[in-house]
Image: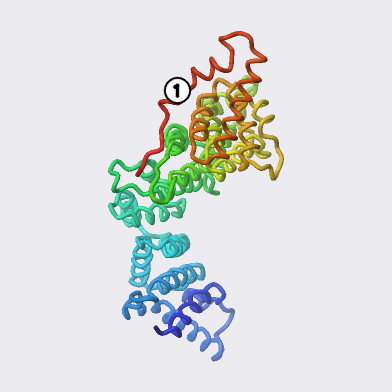
Amino acid sequence: MDWTRFGLALYLRDCGPSRRVIEPKWIGRTNGPLSENAFQGVVDLLYKQKHVAGIVPAIEKARLYRGKGGEIMRSSVSRFIECISVAHVHLPEKVKRSLLDTINENLRHPNSQIQNAAVKALKHFCPAYLANVDDKSVNDFISKYLEQLSDPNVAARRGSALAISVLPFKFLAKRWTLVLPKLCSACAIEDNPEDRDAEARVNAVKGLISVCETLTGTAECSNCYLGEDDMSMLFFIKNEVMQCLFKALDDYSIDNRGDVGSWVREAAMDGLQICTRILCKKGSFGILSGSHKVESASEHVNRGTTENNQMNTLFGENLAIGLVGGIAKQAVEKIDKIRELAAKVLQRILYDTTLCVPFIPYREKLEEIIPDKAELEWGVPTFSYPRFVQLLQCTCYSKSVLSGLVISVGGLQDSLRRASLNALLEYLKASNLENHNEQNSGEFMLSTDYRYSLGSPTVEKM
């Protein structure tokens, strides 16, 4: 193996952003004629750009991706493309197409590090070299990634979802009706057991959330008038994306690595928080807030009611119940990391200082259970279970919480099983002392919710 060659590749990939690049169009912007030395400097820089642009094609022509160092070279090439994209090195059209093909090839590679390097390269390559391409080329470009979301090759599915997640607003704005539904479908467990891949679903969830953020959080649309197409997109996020993420919380797939569905549930919880912020922010912004017309007195009086209705339209009580209930279920399940994440997500939702999430039932009780304190040991079973088991008295959350408790009480880990069962028994004991009416007793309410939990998703082997 020629280690000098790989060292040179590693050097070149990191030198791009630190070098000043002169585009050909800059020539002639001086106040007077160029001196001989200045002219020679420009010629040298253009000469160097030409050679820099030819490095990747030369590597591929020499077939340096083969052998033991092939993976190192692929990562270095992706990093190099990222650097020349950041530096806006002038490239011929043929070289641009060649580099895009290289990125797409690396996106399909089974090595996750190579895929991630290719995604970073694509993120900078698109605005640098594809910003002015025609709509047909963009449609073909995006359609290829969308088709690969259902490709039998799991590496292609993983890479395409990550690629879509970094596409710029300009590419997604007119095509969200194609992109969002396809990503939602990719988040679901595959029908064919042989095609199932947890990493592909995780990437699809992350890609879905990233696209929603790009479409709703960019400078082009964050403070603009919400037209009919914008409202259609927000309603799609409410009715389809949120429901897709709720279903992802029921991913309990396992393989020889264990509960790989927990990776999907983890990504879904983060996604639910982000989508909740999107809907609440846009709902509070309102359709009318982008208008600069002069209001009449009656319009001014009724404006508060209109904006409240707008908020209720995008984020209502039913959505809030599903949000808190779904995450609370994860907060009482068997994996420490998932319980800790769920508690912290609920904490961020309840105590968001920049935006109030409305219509959450039993908010005071939730704030009592989940205080606004840092460094609480939510991953410790003896700390978290006694707190979250109190949600069994909240009828809108009790079924979800019990579904999570069933998994923990029936778990194989003795300490976890004991902690969850003791917390449940202590809750029932305290509930019976407070309520002498049989209809309101803890056992009666628990038996009613238990019948629901029998129909909840169970751990299923991939």
> Residue 190, how many percent across, how many down?
32, 43
Relative placement, left or right, of 94 versus 448 is left
In which quadrant will I find the C terminus?
Answer: top left
Q: Is residue 114 above or below residue 295?
A: below
Circle 1 Cα neighbour tier, 10 Å, few/some/many (<14 / 14–19 / ≥20):
some
> Residue 81, how many percent across, how many down?
44, 70
What SS does tag 1 mark? helix
Residue 139 at least partly seen? yes
Residue 285 at least partly seen? no
Q: Name the residue under label 1.
A: 452
Image quadrant assignment for residue 421: top right
Which is more toward the observer, 120 or 87? 120
> Residue 159, how many percent across, how many down?
38, 56
Q: In the image, what residue occupies the spot 33% across and 54% down?
A: 154
Q: Which amino acid does label 1 sit on?
A: Tyr
Q: In the image, what residue occupies the spot 52% across and 35% down?
A: 408
